[in-house]
Amino acid sequence: MAIQIDVQRYQPRQVEQPYGQLLETQDFPRSDPWSWKMRQVLAERATVFSGKPLIEGGIGDARNELEIYDALHGVGFSRPTSIIGIDIETWRLDFAAHNLEQTDMPYELIYGGAYQWLAQLPEKQIIEGNAIFCLPQAPLLIGESVADGYDARYIPDYAHPWDTYGLGLNFAVLTELGKRATTDFTAFTMLNTRIPEEALDAMVAAAGWRIVAKHSTEPLPVQQDPDTDITYTIQHDDGQRFYELTKSGTYEAISALEAEKRRKACLVSGGGRAELNVYHHLIVYELQPAKIVN
Ligand SMILES: C[S@@+](CC[C@H](N)C(=O)[O-])C[C@H]1O[C@@H](n2cnc3c(N)ncnc32)[C@H](O)[C@@H]1O
């Protein structure tokens, strides 16, 4: 059973940062490959967001909204009409508020789980516009950041079968959103191929969505985050999920077991990214509801 969490409108606290200077969540910096891939896709597809409401589950410091805002401004399109940003940590919402204050986008911040917020809305409620999700896709380990792993207590029983792929949170959120989204609603969901791509396709289909486009990091993989556990991927490994960068500059496949061995060694040595020769691909799924729901 998912834990009972009150989802509530959040009144952000003032942060000590001058207006005009953005804040950045340091446990998920802008330089993180997941972040830059997401922002690259959002900037390319920015016109989708023009003149429509936008929801982000796991908004962090709201850099994705700022990316869309700047990209639309650059091409003379109108901004999203409103933002709803949800997160389970209040300090991140404070950062989001500070950053969103630099724009003229109306916004509302929600403290709580993205699944919990969606699930408490009436099923007949119609949700229009777009959504963004760059949610964790690994089990949360003790002491780890909630940017890297998800707490399984934040998802309902029906989503747990997807935990084995690290996809329980994404499945729960997409399922609840899909029940309420209009047929022209678009969701941009960051997923990783540390597990076979067929599992990702199956998860989004089971959650009630069809794939409009896949924006992949192919042909150049991104570096594995040293802090994110990948033990869960070993059971699904086909030997083609992870890569190492060779001296000749090519990427060669390595097993998930080898990848996790290197990641753990890197944690012990404290060498960080500089010492982790493990790479994998990411895909931003562009999705629309698969069926008529309203
Ligand atoms: C990888 S970070 C991405 C942050 C932001 N979307 C970005 O791209 O910069 C994941 C975010 O999801 C949030 N998060 C984790 N579990 C969540 C949940 N169950 N519901 C809502 N947000 C969650 C974390 O606090 C974090 O802000």
Image (tube, rainbow, N blue to C red):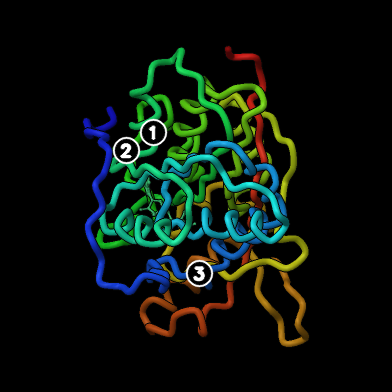
Q: Residues within 10 Å of mark 2 (few under 14, many from 20)?
A: many
Q: Is residue 79 left or right of residue 146?
A: right
Does any atom of ligand 1 lie closer than 8 Å to the CB of label 1? yes
The image quarter containing residue 184 is top right
- The quarter of the picture where the N terminus appears is top left
Does any atom of ligand 1 lie closer than 8 Å to the CB of label 3? yes
Residues at discs 1 and 3 in contact (Cβ within 8 Å)? no
Q: Is residue 131 left or right of residue 18?
A: right
Percent of width and height locating residue 31: 53, 73
Task: Name the residue that disc number 2 marks.
Answer: 154
Task: Name the residue that disc number 1 marks.
Answer: 115
Residues at discs 1 and 2 in contact (Cβ within 8 Å)? yes
User: Relative to the observer, which residue lies in front, 230 or 11?
Assistant: 11
Task: Name the residue that disc number 3 marks.
Answer: 30
- The quarter of the picture where the C terminus appears is top right
Q: Residue at x 63, y 25 (%)?
A: 289
Does any atom of ligand 1 lie closer than 8 Å to the CB of label 2? yes
User: Relative to the observer, which residue lies in front, 195 or 78?
Assistant: 78
Q: Residues within 10 Å of mark 1 (few under 14, many from 20)?
A: many
Q: What amino acid is found at the position of numbered circle 2 in the picture?
A: Tyr
